[in-house]
Image (cartoon, coloured by chain):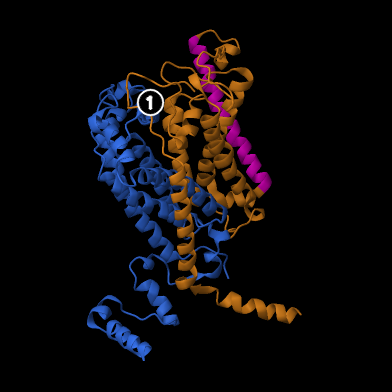
């Protein structure tokens, strides 16, 4: 008796106007539903509805592309949490780090997860590239997706690099100083690079000054890197990821010809 | 027996596709949970570093870039910043993007094979594992104050005395006039590329055959040869430095290589 009652309540819910407006198909395990699960879902439709059998094997993909994306999502989620407490101003930045570590609920955990996920993302994206090379998955028709992937690799490094400055401690400013010295040495565009006289590059007007927002690393650099780190590069990376995933969906997973 | 084997093989070949839901989504879900758990445990156990507040007047010795750029910083030992920090990284990125267009081998598309694309994989292995990763390991674990070499267990002595005995190659060979040194240096660099590309040409013909070279075409060959010889310039320069204390090969008032 009681069971019947529950069945009735369930029926009332899943056949209600509201439920049907949200969920367009049932959950029975039919081939049609299996396809709909993917194609009618905005998140899952990044996948093709069907994939080659070998393509789902972990020893083929190493899961590295998906894990790179997972690490990106991790940094987005933990990063938003950190943004609530962090001010990209030279006077406050370091104090906010201490505040975050000692006073905020789960502040230290969120910061740790953000940092380790960022490092993991760099490692995973390299391993992903290595795997794609080993399986020759950049070969026709996937040449362009490899190019998009290389750009995403560069953006991953830049995301990690711009984030490195934000704690505003000795580790960050000197690592970023060393890293950015390359810009100072650019041929033509850097004031220590060869042929800079031809362009008139000088310490406060060259490639590095453009990156730093001034001749030296300083408060302006902090704000610049913060905006690059939190808005600009994630946006560009997201757009490229959309292209990257879309291409995989169109071309399918690579595999030996049948 | 043979018939059975064939019958077993056939349906797999025809219907190779399976539903993404549940087969792929299930894997992704489980792996995502597993990696998330590992990440959380790792983050509970190991704190992200935070040193003293930024102080532009106190330069730490050594100042290291983030670990993933330490390969580039390590290259600064062997090349000037404009080359190691700007030109070579640009060539690495451009070179990576070129891969699908210079590799015309149709084999090995979508499956693991070493036999069918030995040279492609060995080249990638040289660039990625031998050069990029090992340079990062050296830069991370074996470099101390003054960017001098230290074993990981060794005390970082900031006063370690290292004799600066590096000399330029033209000087080493007896050139004392600046202009002739520059001419000789330029000759060495050009000769390196001409001879290197020539050897690469001969080698490709030997292992892949003339017919392959014709299909490959001069543009693909030129790009590949240039990138490959440029990549080899790093170990060559490392060898010259470590074996003969050579600082530069080409010395001019504008650029040194």
Residue B145 at x, y percent in the picture: 49, 20
Residue A82 at x, y percent in the picture: 30, 45
| Residue sitting at the far right | B1
Q: Is residue B84 above or below residue B182?
A: below
From the viewer's perspective, tell me whether residue B152 is left or right of residue B94: right
Dividing the image into 4 quarters, which one contains the N terminus of chain B?
bottom right
| Residue sitting at the far bottom | A1
Q: Which chain is blue?
A: A
From the viewer's perspective, tell me whether residue B171 is left or right of residue A228: right
Q: Magenta segment range?
A: B178-207
| Magenta region includes residue A192 | no
How would you rate the neighbour count of disc 1 (Cα within 10 Å): few for under 14, some for 14-19, many for 20 or more? many
Query: Residue A141, can we see it?
Result: yes
Q: Please name whichever residue, A16 or A255, is drawn nearer the observer in this view of the structure.
A: A16
From the viewer's perspective, tell me whether residue B87 is left or right of residue A228: right
Which quarter of the picture shows residue A251?
bottom left
Q: Is residue A254 above or below residue B184?
A: below
Q: Which chain is orange?
A: B
Q: Which residue is mark 1?
A: A185
């Amino acid at each position: 008796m009681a069971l019947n009652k529950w069945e009735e309540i369930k029926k009332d819910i899943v056949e209600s106007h509201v439920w049907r407006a949200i969920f367009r198909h049932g959950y029975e395990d039919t081939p049609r539903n299996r396809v709909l699960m993917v194609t009618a879902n905005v998140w899952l439709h990044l996948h093709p509805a069907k994939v080659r059998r070998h393509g789902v094997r972990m020893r083929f993909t190493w899961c590295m592309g998906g894990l790179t994306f997972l690490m990106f999502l991790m940094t987005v989620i933990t990063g938003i949490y950190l943004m609530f407490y962090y001010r990209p101003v030279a006077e406050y930045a370091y104090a906010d780090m201490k505040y975050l570590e000692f006073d905020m609920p789960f502040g230290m955990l969120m910061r740790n997860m953000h940092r380790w996920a960022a490092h993991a993302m760099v490692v995973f994206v390299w391993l992903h590239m290595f795997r794609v090379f080993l399986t020759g998955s950049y070969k026709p028709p996937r040449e362009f997706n490899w190019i998009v992937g290389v750009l995403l690799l560069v953006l991953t490094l830049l995301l990690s690099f711009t984030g490195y400055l934000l704690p505003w401690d000795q580790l960050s400013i000197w690592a970023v100083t060393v890293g950015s010295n390359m810009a100072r040495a650019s041929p033509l565009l850097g004031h220590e690079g060869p042929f800079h006289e031809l362009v008139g590059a000088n310490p406060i007007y060259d490639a590095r000054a453009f990156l730093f927002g001034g001749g030296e690393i300083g408060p302006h650099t902090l704000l610049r890197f913060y905006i690059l780190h939190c808005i600009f590069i994630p946006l560009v990376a997201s757009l490229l990821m959309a292209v990257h995933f879309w291409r995989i969906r169109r071309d399918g997973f690579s595999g030996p010809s049948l | 027996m043979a018939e059975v084997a064939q019958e077993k093989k056939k349906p797999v070949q025809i219907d190779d596709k399976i539903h993404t839901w549940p087969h792929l989504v299930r894997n992704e879900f489980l792996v995502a949970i597993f990696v998330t758990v590992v990440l959380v445990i790792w983050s509970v156990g190991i704190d992200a570093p935070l040193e003293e507040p930024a102080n532009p007047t106190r330069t730490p010795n050594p100042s290291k870039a983030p670990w993933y750029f330490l390969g580039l910083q390590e290259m600064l030992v062997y090349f000037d910043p404009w080359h190691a920090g700007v030109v070579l990284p640009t060539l690495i990125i451009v070179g990576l993007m070129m891969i699908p267009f210079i590799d015309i081998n149709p084999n090995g598309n979508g499956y693991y094979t070493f036999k069918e694309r030995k040279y492609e994989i060995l080249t990638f292995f040289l660039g990625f594992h031998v050069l990029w990763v090992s340079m990062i390991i050296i830069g991370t674990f074996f470099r101390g104050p003054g960017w001098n070499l230290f074993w990981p267990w060794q005390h970082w002595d900031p006063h370690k005395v290292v004799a600066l005995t590096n000399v330029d190659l033209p000087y080493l060979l007896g050139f004392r006039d600046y202009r002739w040194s520059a001419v000789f240096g330029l000759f060495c660099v050009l000769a390196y590329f001409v001879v290197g590309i020539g050897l690469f040409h001969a080698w490709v013909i030997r292992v892949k055959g003339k017919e392959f070279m014709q299909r490959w075409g001069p543009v693909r060959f030129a790009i590949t040869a240039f990138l490959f010889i440029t990549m080899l310039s790093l170990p060559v320069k490392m060898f010259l430095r470590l074996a003969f204390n050579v600082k530069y090969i080409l010395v001019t008032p504008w650029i040194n290589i």
